Image (cartoon, grey):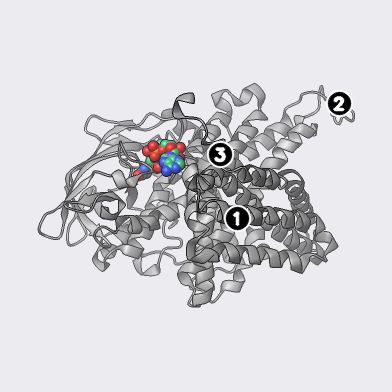
Amino acid sequence: MPVYKAPVEDVMFLLNDVFPIERYNNLSGFADATPDTVEAILAEGAKLCEEAFAPLNLSGDQEGCTRSADGSVTTPKGFKEAYEAYSAGGWMGLAAPEEFGGQGLPSVLNTVMQEFISSANLALGMYPGLTQGAIAALLVHGTEEQKRTYLPKMIEGAWTGTMNLTEPHCGTDLGLLKSKAVPNGDGSYAISGTKIFISAGEHDMAENIVHLVLARIEGAPAGTKGISLFVVPKFLVKEDGALGDRNGVSCGSLEHKMGIHGNATCVMNYDGARGWLIGEENRGLNAMFVMMNEARLAVGVQGLAQSEVAYQNAVAYAKDRLQGRALTGAKFPDKPADPIIVHPDVRRTLLSIKAVNEAGRALVVWTGLNSDIAHRSSDEAQRQVAEDYMGLMTPVVKGVLTDLGFDNAVKAQQMFGGHGYVEESGMSQFVRDARITQIYEGANGIQAMDLVGRKLGKDGGRAVMTFFNEVGAFCQENAGDENLKAYIAPLQQGLGHLQQATMWFMQNAMARPDNAGAGATDYMHLFGLVVMGYMWAKMAKAAQGKKAEGNGAADRMDAKLVTGRFFMERLMPETGTRLARISTGADTTMALPAEAF
Ligand SMILES: Cc1cc2nc3c(=O)[nH]c(=O)nc-3n(C[C@H](O)[C@H](O)[C@H](O)COP(=O)(O)OP(=O)(O)OC[C@H]3O[C@@H](n4cnc5c(N)ncnc54)[C@H](O)[C@@H]3O)c2cc1C
């Protein structure tokens, strides 16, 4: 049975020492989040994930979801009860507004919980995950009546949510969308069409399912400018809030897929289902973007989460599995062989995962904090910087952490040799589950294009320039610190590569867009290395400070500092390779005619 222990101590180091959240006590909800309260909340969340969610991961994968002839879907044994424990604990509304039954705490705590949940059981965690995305969209774009009708029940966990974008002929290119909405004359619309790949589209865990659906109102313009967003409940809701008739939406079939077997991926048929417009007509993509951005960050966190749980299992195995002797002579002469963790190549592999996980976690916490600032600060300038960072980091968190999450799950599986390839070790599941994170919520190639094509140039490049200035200033301030030299010098070099790549795009991509397309994925990963390098430099500084205080965490801080050095020595040099690739442009990439492939 695979193991999982939520990294609460590491998160507390980030929240208390690296990005002290006390600094934000002026934001609503933060004053209640004292270090002791946060630790108690996370300890409780860790318990839920370790004891209720993780034990169902392997069995959920083996059992999967089943659909009956009447279209109802049954989730794997134990999922319903685990979800009930989650709802009863108030986890759905941890960061949701108090006026709708939430606890109003900082959303960064929710981000942290998303990691724990996704490590423990990704398939199960997606049911509440999508609900939180739907809650966010309704909060921003819903009418007062819609908020009153849906939010309290969703925040309580009694009703779950979904997002319905994809159709058989359109995934990335939503402009091709065909589902239609015809006004009923009473303020509602009749929604018809087929949606595919809808996560948590139908299941047995909640009383009602609130679908957010993109469709085209009759007569609307073609393309993305004619798409509207609707709320379509599985059961219609009466005026007093009680559930009424079944709506015209049903699950036509379940997809048979590579991973996340415990999550119901549904074909959803809408046959004149009653729906209500969310936000303005033809501005549906804009409204759905709230949910998509939430979901993109959450999917990045899922990538990190799979990498973390796969790593923990690989470490446990590497300390236990006896094969060969250390190159410098037996370390455990009384045993028939040494544990494989003595071998440099095994350590290289494990450290390369650990170095990404800890930097990835810092990046996710930093982004979560920016989300809080963007939503809760009354200082416009502070809010603008946070919003800029959110926009800039969303494709980086999604694309980089999920690409690395999958790579790391494979690396961790490798530590098991053949035992990782057979199902009972659980390593195969981590690889299979991690794979989807690179595809859904906008395939990673699209994230890279979003970064290069939209985010770089937005507002005259304001966000990226703010980021460059912040990292540059940090390097300058700490350049004289001998203890930080091993972190600052590689970071400075990486930042230089990123700035050169950015300049290269400015000079070469406007006139020739293929240059941007051909370099986008390298640029996204170059960006990821630099922002993770920045996270490591900040963590190294905090770890040095904590060691100097002498408060008993010296071993953990030493491990941090070594892991950070490994990142700088072994992973950061890749920035040069990425820059070199980008600078070759698109000529060779675009040279072959399609028939030559
Ligand atoms: C398990 C699972 C769960 C899902 N859950 C949901 C859900 O809950 N709700 C929902 O609405 N959808 C969901 N999806 C759909 C998912 O978001 C889409 O599969 C994804 O957005 C890609 O769309 P597509 O599959 O049509 O691929 P396509 O759009 O056909 O893309 C195919 C490939 O071409 C590349 N490509 C396409 N256009 C471009 C371009 N302009 N430039 C460069 N490259 C390009 C893509 O990167 C991709 O690699 C889910 C999918 C799966 C498999």
Quick check: 95 left or right of 430?
Answer: left
Which residue sits at x=35%, y=31%?
255
Q: Which residue is more in the foreground, 152 or 577?
A: 577
Q: Position of residue 33 (x, y in %)?
A: 55, 68
Q: Residues within 10 Å of mark 2 (few under 14, many from 20)?
A: few
**Percent from the top left, x then y, of residue 163?**
34, 48
When the figure is inspected, residue 140 is found, relative to residue 129, above or below; the finding is: below
Question: On the image, numbered disc 2 is attached to which residue?
Answer: 334
Question: Where is mark 1, residue-wise?
Answer: 502
Residue beneath the point at 72% across and 56% down: 491
Q: Percent position (x, y) of residue 292? A: 40, 52
Alpha carbons under labels 3 and 1: distance apart:
19 Å
What kind of residue is marked 3? Asp
Crowding at dot 1, Cα within 10 Å, few <14 / some 14-19 / many 20+, comes out as some
User: Residue 158: x percent and y percent?
Assistant: 32, 53
Please rate how many residues cluster around mark 3, counting C-alpha atoms within 10 Å: few if below 14, some from 14 to 19, many from 20: few
Residue occupied by mark 3: 587
User: Can you see residue 546?
Assistant: yes
